[in-house]
């Protein structure tokens, strides 16, 4: 892992078109601004991990229960 | 061609193939899916992966559970699916079925441009919607 020190208003450039700028340094957190091309999605890691975990659970869905689920769903007024 | 998935057997052709410009989180190596529907699976559809590890998902339009669901992407996502904000897209919430019941992921929907069959899994930075919104069953 590359470890570098940045101060407020300093930035890091990654590849072409990705810039991460330190906006504010507080006691409990650091506020960063991220500029990236439209093709590069940017996510908070914990949110991304939650979605990844949800996708994995969905891919393992119990297919045997689906028929019953459809019947119950159609039953809802 | 006939395609067999965990959720049933479907008739499909190349027009049903979706290219994921932003793949599903955790399934980055699977870029192509078949979007399959059948009367006996309605209101659900099946998003069936064609590339390894070829995951298969049960999906449902988020508006089925929430009529006011905001079907909107950000500017970069519209660019990725090749659509403008005023074009109608297909919206799919990924459904999880287990012994406790069924939930739909309204936090990170899949949106597909039906004209070009290009899709994204949208993960907005902020959202009031749940990853595990319960399906209305009794």
Image (cartoon, rainbow, N blue to C red):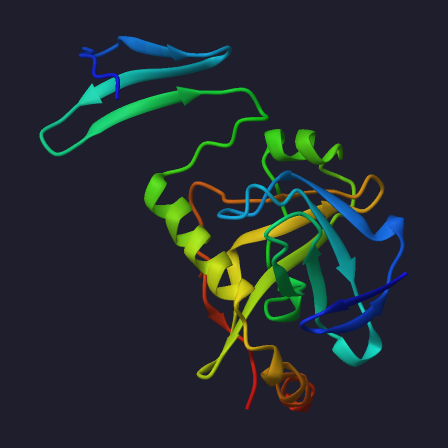
Question: Horizontal and vertical percent for residue A73?
Answer: 64, 84
Question: Horizontal and vertical percent for residue B82?
Answer: 75, 32
In the image, is B70 to the left or to the right of A45? right
Q: Quadrant of residue A53?
A: bottom left
Q: Residue furthest front?
A: B52
Q: Nearer the viewer, residue B129 or A70?
A: A70
Residue in view at x 45 percent, y 52 percent: A51
Residue in view at x 50 percent, y 12 percent: A17
Question: Horizontal and vertical percent for residue A21?
Answer: 32, 15
Q: Nearer the viewer, residue B131 or B40?
A: B40
Give the vertical position of B97 relative to B49 (above or below).
below
Quarter placement of the N terminus of chain A: top left
In the image, is B13 to the left or to the right of A46? right
Residue in view at x 55 percent, y 20 percent: A37
In the image, is B54 to the left or to the right of B130? right
Question: Horizontal and vertical percent for residue A72?
Answer: 63, 89
């Amino acid at each position: 892992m590359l470890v570098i020190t940045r101060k407020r208003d300093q930035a890091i450039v990654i590849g072409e078109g990705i810039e991460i700028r330190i906006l504010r340094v507080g006691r409990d957190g650091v506020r960063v601004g991220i500029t990236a091309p439209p093709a590069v999605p940017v996510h908070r890691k914990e949110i991304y991990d939650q979605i990844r975990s949800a996708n994995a659970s969905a891919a393992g869905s119990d297919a045997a229960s689906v028929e019953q689920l459809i019947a119950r769903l159609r039953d809802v007024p | 061609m006939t395609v067999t998935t965990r959720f049933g057997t479907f008739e499909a052709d190349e027009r049903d193939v979706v290219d994921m410009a932003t793949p599903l989180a955790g399934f980055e190596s699977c870029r192509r899916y078949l979007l399959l529907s059948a009367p006996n699976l309605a209101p659900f559809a099946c998003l069936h992966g064609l590339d390894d590890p070829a995951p298969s998902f049960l999906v449902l339009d988020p508006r089925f559970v929430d009529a006011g669901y905001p079907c909107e992407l950000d500017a970069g996502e519209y660019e990725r699916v090749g659509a403008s904000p005023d074009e109608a897209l297909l919206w799919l919430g990924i459904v999880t079925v287990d012994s406790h019941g069924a939930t739909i992921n309204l936090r990170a929907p899949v949106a597909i441009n039906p004209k070009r069959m290009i899709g994204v899994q949208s993960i907005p930075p902020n959202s009031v919607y749940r990853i595990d919104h319960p399906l209305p069953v009794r």
